[in-house]
Image (tube, grey):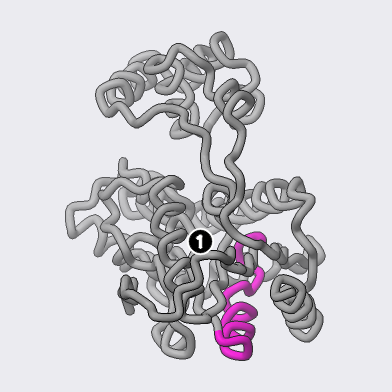
């Protein structure tokens, strides 16, 4: 169920105060949706989805979107806002989410920024360095070069022009490698240098970041069971539907975890057993990368999903302190 963004004037607008926002972050499969819904109901809030995959229409099961019943309990925003073949990035998210936060703040509604896409959260809270706009011609040429010369060709090129970025980007992360090379070609400056020189802008909001975590083996067990549940709910049919609608398997959205695995199975490239095994493995690896990202943020206060009382206490103290 798509929630429409409300862009209405409010008589209660207070332009002198910064909005307070509550960030609920953490790895996939941890239960962020259930926790945030409970908190938003109790504290008069609404949820701004912060997931780089839940923005896409028609991609519901594989992205673990809140169900229609869950979305009926609390208003959710920035879910189902673009088609799978439409461009969308962190800068666009930050702009849309920022406007939403101002509207919710004007109506005395607490924005709960909920999700596991760390870059989206960072872009919203701090802003992004201006590392040049996208150049589709350069991207196309780089993709063709990778196909011509083989896997690893672009990563080797990145190592030569931006060793810092190469150290941060996985050799198989073609999307980020191409983006880094694109910035270098369009601006003559390494993307890592942009981050160093421009940094992140002064924040616009008062922010409380709450990270959800649990013991690794317990999380991995939840992830494995979630994958089984997605398959039971019809993930294969969802991917067949997307292919039937004409969405190419080469799209960024279709190359994401779950969707690329099912495409490989549907196309007969791997067995069902291998599909399930690699999907669970890659989801666990993704969760590990998410935890690494959030653990590096010293502002995050950590709690377990079951500690709803403690989390509510943290939020209440934060909101009271910001009123003074």
Q: Is residue 222 above or below residue 140?
A: below
Q: Is 273 positioned to the left or the right of 86 in the image?
A: right
Give the labeled residue for mark 1: 50
Q: Quadrant of residue 132?
A: top left
Left or right: where does residue 87 sit relative to residue 51? left
Q: Left or right: where does residue 49 sit relative to residue 55?
A: right
Q: Residue furthest top?
A: 160
Residue 167 appears at what percent x and percent y?
A: 66, 24
- Residue shown at the point (65%, 51%) measured from the top left: 290
> Quick one: label 1, few (<14), some, or many (20+) residues within 10 Å?
many
Is 292 part of what is drawn in magenta? no
Q: Quadrant of residue 244?
A: bottom left
- Quadrant of the frame with the C terminus: bottom right
Quarter occupied by residue 18: bottom right
Residue 274 x, y percent position in the rendering: 52, 52
Q: Residue at x 46, y 67 (%)?
A: 102
Q: Residue at x 63, y 74 (%)?
A: 31
Q: Is residue 256 above or below residue 19?
A: above
Q: Residue at x 30, y 64 (%)?
A: 57
- Residue closest to the eye, 196 or 292: 196
Q: Is residue 306 visible?
A: no
Q: Which sits in the foreground, 217 or 272?
A: 217
Residue extending furthest toward the front: 16
Q: Residue 47, how many percent across, how many down? A: 50, 74
How many discs appear? 1
Picture coordinates of residue 43 (x, y %)?
Answer: 62, 86
Q: Which residues are magenta?
A: 26-44
33 is within the stretch colored magenta? yes
């Amino acid at each position: 169920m798509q929630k429409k963004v409300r862009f209405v004037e409010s008589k209660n607008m207070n332009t002198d105060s910064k909005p307070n926002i509550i960030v609920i972050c953490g790895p996939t499969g941890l239960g962020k949706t259930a926790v945030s819904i409970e908190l938003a109901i109790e504290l008069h809030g609404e949820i701004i989805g912060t997931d780089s995959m839940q923005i896409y229409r028609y991609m519901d099961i594989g992205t673990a979107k809140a169900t229609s019943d869950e979305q009926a309990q609390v208003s959710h925003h920035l879910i189902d806002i673009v088609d799978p073949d439409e461009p969308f990035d962190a800068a666009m998210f930050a702009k849309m989410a920022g406007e939403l936060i101002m509207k919710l703040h004007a109506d005395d509604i607490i924005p709960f920024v909920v999700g596991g896409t760390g870059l989206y959260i960072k872009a919203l809270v701090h802003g992004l360095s201006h590392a040049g706009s996208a150049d589709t011609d350069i991207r196309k040429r780089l993709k063709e070069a990778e196909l011509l010369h083989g896997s690893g060709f672009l990563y080797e090129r990145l190592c030569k022009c931006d060793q810092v970025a190469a150290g941060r980007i996985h050799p198989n992360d073609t999307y980020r490698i191409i983006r880094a090379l694109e910035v270098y070609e369009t601006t003559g400056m390494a993307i890592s240098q942009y981050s160093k020189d421009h940094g992140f802008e002064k924040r616009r909001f008062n922010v409380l970041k709450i990270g959800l975590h649990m013991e690794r083996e317990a999380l991995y067990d939840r992830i494995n069971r979630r994958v089984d549940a997605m398959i039971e709910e019809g993930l294969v049919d969802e991917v067949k539907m997307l292919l039937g609608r004409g969405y190419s398997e080469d799209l960024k959205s279709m190359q994401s975890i779950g969707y690329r695995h099912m495409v490989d199975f549907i196309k007969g490239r791997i067995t069902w057993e291998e599909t399930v095994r690699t999907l669970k493995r890659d989801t666990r690896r993704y969760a590990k990368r998410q935890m690494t990202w959030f653990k590096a943020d010293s502002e995050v206060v950590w709690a377990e999903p079951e500690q709803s009382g403690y989390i509510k206490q943290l939020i209440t103290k934060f909101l009271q302190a910001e009123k003074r």
